[in-house]
Protein backbone atom coordinates (compact mmCIF):
# COMPACT_ATOMS: atom_id res chain seq x y z
CA UNK A 1 0.00 0.00 0.00
CA UNK A 2 1.34 3.44 -0.91
CA UNK A 3 2.25 5.53 2.15
CA UNK A 4 0.61 8.91 2.61
CA UNK A 5 2.69 11.87 1.54
CA UNK A 6 2.47 13.39 5.03
CA UNK A 7 4.02 10.33 6.69
CA UNK A 8 7.66 9.51 7.34
CA UNK A 9 9.32 6.70 5.38
CA UNK A 10 10.76 3.65 7.18
CA UNK A 11 14.08 3.72 5.35
CA UNK A 12 16.59 2.83 8.13
CA UNK A 13 17.87 -0.77 8.12
CA UNK A 14 19.28 -2.61 11.18
CA UNK A 15 22.80 -1.75 10.03
CA UNK A 16 21.89 1.93 9.69
CA UNK A 17 20.19 1.86 13.09
CA UNK A 18 23.14 0.26 14.91
CA UNK A 19 25.42 2.78 13.18
CA UNK A 20 23.10 5.53 14.40
CA UNK A 21 23.52 4.36 18.01
CA UNK A 22 27.30 3.84 17.86
CA UNK A 23 27.99 6.79 15.60
CA UNK A 24 25.90 9.24 17.63
CA UNK A 25 27.34 8.16 20.97
CA UNK A 26 31.01 8.12 19.96
CA UNK A 27 31.72 11.77 19.27
CA UNK A 28 34.25 14.07 20.90
CA UNK A 29 33.86 13.16 24.58
CA UNK A 30 36.07 10.07 24.60
CA UNK A 31 38.92 12.16 23.15
CA UNK A 32 38.55 15.11 25.53
CA UNK A 33 36.79 14.28 28.79
CA UNK A 34 39.44 12.06 30.41
CA UNK A 35 41.50 15.13 31.32
CA UNK A 36 38.79 16.84 33.37
CA UNK A 37 37.87 13.49 34.96
CA UNK A 38 41.48 13.07 36.08
CA UNK A 39 41.41 16.58 37.54
CA UNK A 40 38.26 15.71 39.51
CA UNK A 41 39.32 12.34 40.93
CA UNK A 42 43.16 12.58 41.09
CA UNK A 43 43.42 8.81 40.59
CA UNK A 44 43.76 6.82 37.33
CA UNK A 45 41.82 3.83 38.65
CA UNK A 46 38.89 6.05 39.67
CA UNK A 47 38.79 7.62 36.20
CA UNK A 48 38.59 4.15 34.63
CA UNK A 49 35.96 3.13 37.19
CA UNK A 50 33.88 6.19 36.25
CA UNK A 51 33.99 5.16 32.56
CA UNK A 52 32.86 1.61 33.44
CA UNK A 53 30.09 2.84 35.77
CA UNK A 54 28.82 5.35 33.20
CA UNK A 55 28.81 2.65 30.53
CA UNK A 56 26.83 0.21 32.68
CA UNK A 57 24.37 2.95 33.62
CA UNK A 58 23.87 3.90 29.99
CA UNK A 59 23.39 0.24 29.06
CA UNK A 60 20.75 -0.08 31.80
CA UNK A 61 18.95 2.90 30.29
CA UNK A 62 19.21 1.43 26.80
CA UNK A 63 17.68 -1.87 27.99
CA UNK A 64 14.66 0.05 29.30
CA UNK A 65 14.37 2.29 26.26
CA UNK A 66 14.43 -0.85 24.11
CA UNK A 67 11.06 -1.89 25.54
CA UNK A 68 9.59 1.59 25.13
CA UNK A 69 10.94 2.00 21.60
CA UNK A 70 9.64 -1.37 20.43
CA UNK A 71 6.21 -0.71 21.95
CA UNK A 72 5.87 2.89 20.68
CA UNK A 73 8.01 3.05 17.49
CA UNK A 74 7.07 6.60 16.53
CA UNK A 75 9.01 9.77 15.72
CA UNK A 76 9.94 11.69 18.85
CA UNK A 77 11.21 8.90 21.11
CA UNK A 78 11.17 10.07 24.73
CA UNK A 79 8.62 12.78 23.95
CA UNK A 80 6.17 10.05 22.89
CA UNK A 81 6.88 7.87 25.95
CA UNK A 82 6.36 10.77 28.37
CA UNK A 83 3.14 11.85 26.65
CA UNK A 84 1.67 8.36 27.03
CA UNK A 85 2.88 7.93 30.62
CA UNK A 86 2.58 11.36 32.24
CA UNK A 87 0.65 13.56 29.83
CA UNK A 88 1.32 16.45 27.51
CA UNK A 89 2.90 18.94 29.94
CA UNK A 90 5.89 16.80 30.93
CA UNK A 91 6.30 15.68 27.31
CA UNK A 92 6.38 19.29 26.11
CA UNK A 93 8.94 20.35 28.73
CA UNK A 94 11.13 17.44 27.64
CA UNK A 95 10.77 18.40 23.97
CA UNK A 96 11.50 22.02 24.78
CA UNK A 97 14.59 20.99 26.75
CA UNK A 98 15.80 18.89 23.81
CA UNK A 99 15.34 21.79 21.40
CA UNK A 100 16.66 24.64 23.54
CA UNK A 101 19.72 22.92 25.04
CA UNK A 102 20.07 19.12 24.76
CA UNK A 103 19.85 18.26 21.05
CA UNK A 104 21.00 21.65 19.80
CA UNK A 105 23.62 21.91 22.56
CA UNK A 106 25.02 18.51 21.59
CA UNK A 107 25.11 19.55 17.95
CA UNK A 108 26.87 22.80 18.90
CA UNK A 109 29.44 20.95 21.01
CA UNK A 110 30.13 18.47 18.22
CA UNK A 111 30.62 21.34 15.79
CA UNK A 112 33.07 22.97 18.20
CA UNK A 113 34.79 19.62 18.78
CA UNK A 114 35.19 19.14 15.03
CA UNK A 115 36.79 22.60 14.74
CA UNK A 116 39.06 21.84 17.73
CA UNK A 117 40.41 18.68 16.11
CA UNK A 118 40.71 20.33 12.71
CA UNK A 119 42.85 23.06 14.28
CA UNK A 120 45.48 20.40 15.06
CA UNK A 121 45.99 20.08 11.29
CA UNK A 122 45.07 23.57 10.07
CA UNK A 123 45.57 26.18 12.81
CA UNK A 124 42.32 28.11 13.33
CA UNK A 125 43.73 30.87 15.49
CA UNK A 126 42.15 34.03 14.07
CA UNK A 127 39.90 35.75 16.64
CA UNK A 128 37.81 38.72 15.45
CA UNK A 129 35.97 39.44 18.69
CA UNK A 130 36.61 38.45 22.31
CA UNK A 131 35.19 39.43 25.67
CA UNK A 132 35.16 38.18 29.25
CA UNK A 133 32.11 38.56 31.48
CA UNK A 134 30.68 37.23 34.72
CA UNK A 135 27.55 35.07 34.60
CA UNK A 136 26.03 33.95 37.93
CA UNK A 137 29.43 34.19 39.60
CA UNK A 138 31.28 32.30 36.85
CA UNK A 139 33.81 33.91 34.54
CA UNK A 140 33.09 33.17 30.89
CA UNK A 141 35.49 33.95 28.07
CA UNK A 142 33.59 34.41 24.77
CA UNK A 143 35.41 34.32 21.44
CA UNK A 144 34.37 34.62 17.81
CA UNK A 145 36.82 33.69 15.10
CA UNK A 146 37.72 31.10 12.49
CA UNK A 147 37.10 28.17 14.84
CA UNK A 148 33.51 29.26 15.43
CA UNK A 149 32.96 29.83 11.69
CA UNK A 150 34.18 26.29 10.96
CA UNK A 151 31.93 24.85 13.68
CA UNK A 152 28.84 26.61 12.32
CA UNK A 153 29.71 25.61 8.75
CA UNK A 154 29.87 21.93 9.74
CA UNK A 155 26.46 22.19 11.44
CA UNK A 156 24.89 23.78 8.38
CA UNK A 157 26.45 21.36 5.86
CA UNK A 158 25.27 18.23 7.71
CA UNK A 159 21.86 19.76 8.29
CA UNK A 160 21.54 20.18 4.52
CA UNK A 161 22.66 16.56 4.01
CA UNK A 162 19.84 15.43 6.29
CA UNK A 163 17.31 17.36 4.24
CA UNK A 164 17.69 14.56 1.68
CA UNK A 165 16.01 11.17 2.28
CA UNK A 166 16.45 9.45 5.65
CA UNK A 167 17.94 6.45 3.82
CA UNK A 168 20.67 8.71 2.45
CA UNK A 169 21.34 10.12 5.92
CA UNK A 170 21.51 6.56 7.25
CA UNK A 171 24.10 5.55 4.64
CA UNK A 172 26.22 8.60 5.47
CA UNK A 173 25.97 7.60 9.14
CA UNK A 174 27.07 4.02 8.47
CA UNK A 175 30.10 5.18 6.48
CA UNK A 176 31.23 7.69 9.10
CA UNK A 177 30.76 5.13 11.89
CA UNK A 178 32.98 2.57 10.15
CA UNK A 179 35.65 5.21 9.55
CA UNK A 180 35.60 6.47 13.14
CA UNK A 181 35.86 2.98 14.66
CA UNK A 182 38.79 2.29 12.34
CA UNK A 183 40.51 5.48 13.49
CA UNK A 184 40.06 4.65 17.17
CA UNK A 185 41.33 1.10 16.56
CA UNK A 186 44.53 2.49 15.00
CA UNK A 187 45.21 4.56 18.13
CA UNK A 188 44.35 1.83 20.65
CA UNK A 189 46.22 -0.99 18.89
CA UNK A 190 49.16 1.33 18.23
CA UNK A 191 49.41 2.29 21.90
CA UNK A 192 49.20 -1.26 23.22
CA UNK A 193 51.82 -2.63 20.82
CA UNK A 194 54.06 0.24 19.70
CA UNK A 195 53.98 3.14 22.20
CA UNK A 196 57.49 4.10 23.33
CA UNK A 197 56.22 5.45 26.68
CA UNK A 198 53.86 2.57 27.58
CA UNK A 199 54.00 1.54 31.23
CA UNK A 200 51.39 -0.17 33.40
CA UNK A 201 52.87 1.80 36.28
CA UNK A 202 50.98 4.83 34.97
CA UNK A 203 47.83 3.31 36.53
CA UNK A 204 49.26 3.84 40.01
CA UNK A 205 48.10 7.05 41.67
CA UNK A 206 51.08 9.47 41.86
CA UNK A 207 52.35 10.28 45.35
CA UNK A 208 52.01 14.02 44.70
CA UNK A 209 48.39 13.78 43.50
CA UNK A 210 45.76 15.64 45.52
CA UNK A 211 43.56 13.51 47.77
CA UNK A 212 40.48 11.86 46.32
CA UNK A 213 37.32 13.91 46.81
CA UNK A 214 35.05 10.94 47.65
CA UNK A 215 31.71 10.12 46.07
CA UNK A 216 31.06 13.75 45.11
CA UNK A 217 34.22 13.85 42.98
CA UNK A 218 33.41 10.44 41.52
CA UNK A 219 29.92 11.65 40.65
CA UNK A 220 31.36 14.72 38.91
CA UNK A 221 33.77 12.53 36.92
CA UNK A 222 30.94 10.16 36.07
CA UNK A 223 28.90 13.11 34.82
CA UNK A 224 31.74 13.96 32.44
CA UNK A 225 31.89 10.35 31.22
CA UNK A 226 28.14 10.34 30.73
CA UNK A 227 28.57 13.19 28.25
CA UNK A 228 30.73 10.86 26.16
CA UNK A 229 28.03 8.16 26.42
CA UNK A 230 25.24 10.64 25.75
CA UNK A 231 23.31 9.88 22.58
CA UNK A 232 22.25 6.29 23.34
CA UNK A 233 18.74 7.66 23.72
CA UNK A 234 18.75 9.44 20.34
CA UNK A 235 18.02 6.59 17.98
CA UNK A 236 14.44 5.99 19.26
CA UNK A 237 13.65 9.58 18.24
CA UNK A 238 13.86 8.32 14.66
CA UNK A 239 12.01 5.05 15.39
CA UNK A 240 9.25 6.18 13.04
CA UNK A 241 11.71 5.68 10.18
CA UNK A 242 13.20 2.32 11.23
CA UNK A 243 12.27 -0.84 9.30
CA UNK A 244 10.71 -3.59 11.46
CA UNK A 245 11.07 -1.44 14.61
CA UNK A 246 9.78 -4.11 17.00
CA UNK A 247 12.96 -6.11 16.33
CA UNK A 248 15.48 -3.56 15.11
CA UNK A 249 15.05 -0.82 17.74
CA UNK A 250 15.88 -3.11 20.74
CA UNK A 251 18.69 -4.87 18.87
CA UNK A 252 20.32 -1.62 17.80
CA UNK A 253 20.18 -0.14 21.31
CA UNK A 254 21.62 -3.21 23.05
CA UNK A 255 24.25 -4.18 20.46
CA UNK A 256 25.28 -0.57 20.00
CA UNK A 257 25.75 0.26 23.69
CA UNK A 258 27.71 -2.92 24.42
CA UNK A 259 30.06 -2.02 21.56
CA UNK A 260 30.45 1.59 22.73
CA UNK A 261 31.20 0.58 26.34
CA UNK A 262 33.93 -1.85 25.25
CA UNK A 263 35.46 0.74 22.88
CA UNK A 264 35.48 3.48 25.54
CA UNK A 265 37.04 1.32 28.26
CA UNK A 266 39.79 0.03 25.94
CA UNK A 267 40.49 3.56 24.66
CA UNK A 268 40.88 5.02 28.15
CA UNK A 269 43.00 2.11 29.29
CA UNK A 270 45.26 2.89 26.33
CA UNK A 271 45.54 6.54 27.42
CA UNK A 272 46.73 5.59 30.89
CA UNK A 273 49.05 2.92 29.53
CA UNK A 274 50.74 5.43 27.22
CA UNK A 275 50.78 8.59 29.39
CA UNK A 276 51.70 9.40 32.95
CA UNK A 277 49.00 10.99 35.09
CA UNK A 278 50.50 14.48 34.84
CA UNK A 279 50.25 14.40 31.04
CA UNK A 280 46.58 13.46 31.25
CA UNK A 281 45.66 16.08 33.86
CA UNK A 282 47.23 18.85 31.75
CA UNK A 283 45.57 17.79 28.49
CA UNK A 284 42.99 19.99 26.75
CA UNK A 285 40.15 21.12 29.04
CA UNK A 286 38.67 24.34 30.38
CA UNK A 287 41.67 24.61 32.73
CA UNK A 288 44.20 24.02 29.92
CA UNK A 289 42.49 25.37 26.81
CA UNK A 290 45.60 25.54 24.63
CA UNK A 291 46.88 22.05 25.45
CA UNK A 292 46.63 19.05 23.14
CA UNK A 293 43.69 16.64 23.66
CA UNK A 294 44.57 13.52 25.66
CA UNK A 295 43.89 11.33 22.61
CA UNK A 296 46.39 13.30 20.51
CA UNK A 297 49.03 13.02 23.24
CA UNK A 298 48.55 9.24 23.35
CA UNK A 299 48.73 8.97 19.54
CA UNK A 300 51.98 10.94 19.49
CA UNK A 301 53.66 8.30 21.68
CA UNK A 302 53.24 5.94 18.74
CA UNK A 303 53.42 8.09 15.59
CA UNK A 304 55.32 11.17 16.74
CA UNK A 305 54.14 14.72 16.12
CA UNK A 306 53.30 14.24 12.45
CA UNK A 307 51.56 10.97 13.17
CA UNK A 308 49.48 12.66 15.85
CA UNK A 309 48.21 15.13 13.28
CA UNK A 310 47.30 12.32 10.90
CA UNK A 311 45.38 10.56 13.66
CA UNK A 312 43.44 13.79 14.21
CA UNK A 313 41.66 12.91 10.96
CA UNK A 314 40.04 9.99 12.78
CA UNK A 315 38.88 12.34 15.52
CA UNK A 316 37.44 14.69 12.92
CA UNK A 317 35.49 11.83 11.34
CA UNK A 318 34.24 10.81 14.77
CA UNK A 319 32.90 14.26 15.52
CA UNK A 320 31.24 14.45 12.10
CA UNK A 321 29.61 11.04 12.53
CA UNK A 322 28.10 12.05 15.86
CA UNK A 323 27.09 15.40 14.39
CA UNK A 324 25.24 13.74 11.50
CA UNK A 325 23.43 11.32 13.82
CA UNK A 326 22.46 14.04 16.29
CA UNK A 327 21.03 16.22 13.51
CA UNK A 328 19.07 13.32 12.02
CA UNK A 329 17.50 12.19 15.31
CA UNK A 330 17.14 15.53 17.11
CA UNK A 331 14.94 17.11 14.44
CA UNK A 332 12.27 14.42 14.94
CA UNK A 333 11.30 15.74 18.39
CA UNK A 334 10.13 19.22 17.23
CA UNK A 335 8.41 17.41 14.34
CA UNK A 336 6.46 15.18 16.75
CA UNK A 337 5.60 18.14 18.99
CA UNK A 338 4.33 20.16 16.03
CA UNK A 339 2.11 17.27 14.94
CA UNK A 340 0.53 17.40 18.41
CA UNK A 341 0.00 21.15 18.11
CA UNK A 342 2.49 22.19 20.82
CA UNK A 343 5.28 23.60 18.66
CA UNK A 344 5.62 25.85 15.64
CA UNK A 345 3.44 24.34 12.92
CA UNK A 346 6.11 24.58 10.20
CA UNK A 347 8.17 21.96 12.07
CA UNK A 348 5.66 19.22 11.16
CA UNK A 349 5.84 19.81 7.40
CA UNK A 350 7.61 17.14 5.34
CA UNK A 351 9.35 17.81 2.06
CA UNK A 352 7.16 16.39 -0.69
CA UNK A 353 10.08 14.57 -2.35
CA UNK A 354 12.37 13.48 0.49
CA UNK A 355 9.65 13.06 3.15
CA UNK A 356 11.82 14.46 5.95
CA UNK A 357 10.96 17.39 8.30
CA UNK A 358 13.09 20.02 6.57
CA UNK A 359 11.79 23.00 8.55
CA UNK A 360 12.46 21.21 11.83
CA UNK A 361 16.02 20.46 10.69
CA UNK A 362 16.62 24.09 9.71
CA UNK A 363 15.19 25.48 12.98
CA UNK A 364 17.48 23.12 14.87
CA UNK A 365 20.50 24.16 12.79
CA UNK A 366 19.86 27.86 13.41
CA UNK A 367 19.70 27.57 17.19
CA UNK A 368 22.62 25.11 17.37
CA UNK A 369 24.73 27.60 15.40
CA UNK A 370 23.92 30.30 17.98
CA UNK A 371 24.96 27.98 20.81
CA UNK A 372 28.18 27.03 19.00
CA UNK A 373 29.53 30.57 19.40
CA UNK A 374 28.22 31.17 22.92
CA UNK A 375 30.15 29.00 25.39
CA UNK A 376 33.08 26.73 26.18
CA UNK A 377 33.04 22.99 25.60
CA UNK A 378 32.82 21.92 29.24
CA UNK A 379 30.24 24.55 30.19
CA UNK A 380 27.92 23.51 27.36
CA UNK A 381 28.25 19.81 28.20
CA UNK A 382 27.37 20.44 31.85
CA UNK A 383 24.18 22.29 30.84
CA UNK A 384 23.26 19.49 28.42
CA UNK A 385 23.95 16.55 30.74
CA UNK A 386 22.21 17.97 33.81
CA UNK A 387 19.06 18.90 31.90
CA UNK A 388 19.04 15.58 30.04
CA UNK A 389 19.39 13.35 33.10
CA UNK A 390 16.36 14.90 34.78
CA UNK A 391 14.28 13.52 31.92
CA UNK A 392 16.26 10.29 31.44
CA UNK A 393 15.18 9.26 34.94
CA UNK A 394 11.59 10.34 34.30
CA UNK A 395 11.39 8.54 30.95
CA UNK A 396 12.85 5.35 32.41
CA UNK A 397 10.27 5.42 35.21
CA UNK A 398 7.56 5.53 32.53
CA UNK A 399 8.18 1.83 31.84
CA UNK A 400 6.51 1.11 35.21
CA UNK A 401 3.63 3.50 34.47
CA UNK A 402 2.99 2.15 30.98
CA UNK A 403 2.98 -1.47 32.14
CA UNK A 404 0.14 -0.47 34.46
CA UNK A 405 -1.69 1.89 32.07
CA UNK A 406 -1.24 -0.20 28.89
CA UNK A 407 -1.01 -3.83 30.07
CA UNK A 408 -2.40 -5.20 26.79
CA UNK A 409 -0.05 -3.25 24.52
CA UNK A 410 2.17 -5.26 22.16
CA UNK A 411 5.68 -5.44 23.64
CA UNK A 412 8.00 -7.17 21.14
CA UNK A 413 10.79 -6.76 23.70
CA UNK A 414 10.57 -6.59 27.49
CA UNK A 415 13.30 -5.00 29.63
CA UNK A 416 15.95 -7.48 30.75
CA UNK A 417 16.11 -7.59 34.55
CA UNK A 418 12.80 -5.77 35.06
CA UNK A 419 12.08 -4.20 37.53
CA UNK A 420 15.59 -4.11 39.05
CA UNK A 421 17.50 -2.59 36.12
CA UNK A 422 15.12 0.33 35.44
CA UNK A 423 14.78 0.97 39.19
CA UNK A 424 18.55 1.13 39.64
CA UNK A 425 18.78 3.48 36.65
CA UNK A 426 16.15 5.82 38.09
CA UNK A 427 17.88 5.88 41.51
CA UNK A 428 21.32 6.60 40.03
CA UNK A 429 19.85 9.28 37.76
CA UNK A 430 18.32 10.95 40.83
CA UNK A 431 21.67 10.79 42.63
CA UNK A 432 23.47 12.32 39.65
CA UNK A 433 20.97 15.20 39.44
CA UNK A 434 21.30 15.94 43.18
CA UNK A 435 25.09 15.62 43.06
CA UNK A 436 25.25 18.05 40.13
CA UNK A 437 22.99 20.54 41.93
CA UNK A 438 25.43 20.50 44.84
CA UNK A 439 28.73 20.46 42.96
CA UNK A 440 27.80 22.34 39.76
CA UNK A 441 25.21 24.84 41.06
CA UNK A 442 25.66 27.41 38.29
CA UNK A 443 25.27 24.91 35.45
CA UNK A 444 22.34 23.26 37.28
CA UNK A 445 20.50 26.54 37.79
CA UNK A 446 21.02 27.49 34.15
CA UNK A 447 19.67 24.09 33.08
CA UNK A 448 16.57 24.50 35.27
CA UNK A 449 15.99 28.05 34.02
CA UNK A 450 16.18 26.87 30.42
CA UNK A 451 13.58 24.18 31.10
CA UNK A 452 11.30 26.65 32.92
CA UNK A 453 11.44 29.06 29.97
CA UNK A 454 9.31 26.57 28.07
CA UNK A 455 6.29 27.01 30.38
CA UNK A 456 5.03 30.31 28.85
CA UNK A 457 5.54 28.84 25.38
CA UNK A 458 3.53 25.76 26.33
CA UNK A 459 0.68 27.94 27.60
CA UNK A 460 0.74 29.85 24.31
CA UNK A 461 0.53 26.68 22.20
CA UNK A 462 -2.21 25.23 24.41
CA UNK A 463 -4.31 28.38 24.01
CA UNK A 464 -3.63 28.43 20.27
CA UNK A 465 -4.67 24.78 19.92
CA UNK A 466 -7.92 25.42 21.80
Image (tube, rainbow, N blue to C red):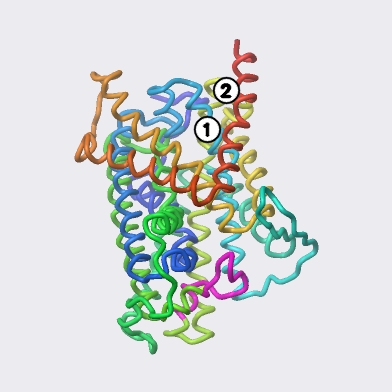
Q: Report helix, strand or loop for mark 2.
A: loop
Which residue is denoted by mark 1 in the rendering?
Answer: 95
Q: Is residue 23 above or below residue 147?
A: above
Q: Residue furthest right?
A: 128
Q: Is residue 192 above or below residue 233?
A: below
- Mark 2–mark 1 distance (CA, rounded to whole Å): 10 Å
Decide which of 455, 14 is in the foreground and name it.
455
Q: Residue furthest front?
A: 211
Q: Residue at x 38, y 70 (%)?
A: 43
Give how far across and how far down residue 29 sits, in percent: 47, 60
Magenta range is: 282-299
User: Can residue 287 be seen from the camera position used here?
Assistant: yes
Q: Residue at x 46, y 57 (%)?
A: 224
Provide the major secondary structure of the magenta segment: loop
Q: Tell me if mark 2 has few (under 14), some (14-19) or many (20+) residues whose alpha carbon lies within 10 angstroms of its own.
A: many
Q: Quadrant of the N terminus?
A: top left
Give how far across and how far down residue 342 sits, in percent: 57, 23
| In this picture, residue 316 sits left or right of residue 58 | right
| In this picture, residue 61 sits left or right of residue 226 | left
Asked if residue 332 lies in the magenta stretch, the reply is no
Badge number at residue 342: 2
Amino acid sequence: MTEEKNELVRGLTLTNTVALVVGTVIGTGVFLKTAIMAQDTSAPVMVLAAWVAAGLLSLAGALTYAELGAMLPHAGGEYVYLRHAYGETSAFLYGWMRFIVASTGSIAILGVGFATFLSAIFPLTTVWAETTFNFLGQTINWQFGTKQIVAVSAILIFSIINCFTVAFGGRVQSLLTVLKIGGIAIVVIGVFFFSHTANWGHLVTPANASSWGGTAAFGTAMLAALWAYDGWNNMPMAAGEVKDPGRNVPRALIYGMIAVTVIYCLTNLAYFYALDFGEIITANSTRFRNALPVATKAAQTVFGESGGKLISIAFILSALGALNGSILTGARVPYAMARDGVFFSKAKELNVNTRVPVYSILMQAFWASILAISGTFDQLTDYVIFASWIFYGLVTSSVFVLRRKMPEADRPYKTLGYPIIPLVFVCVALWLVINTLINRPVESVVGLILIALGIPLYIYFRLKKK
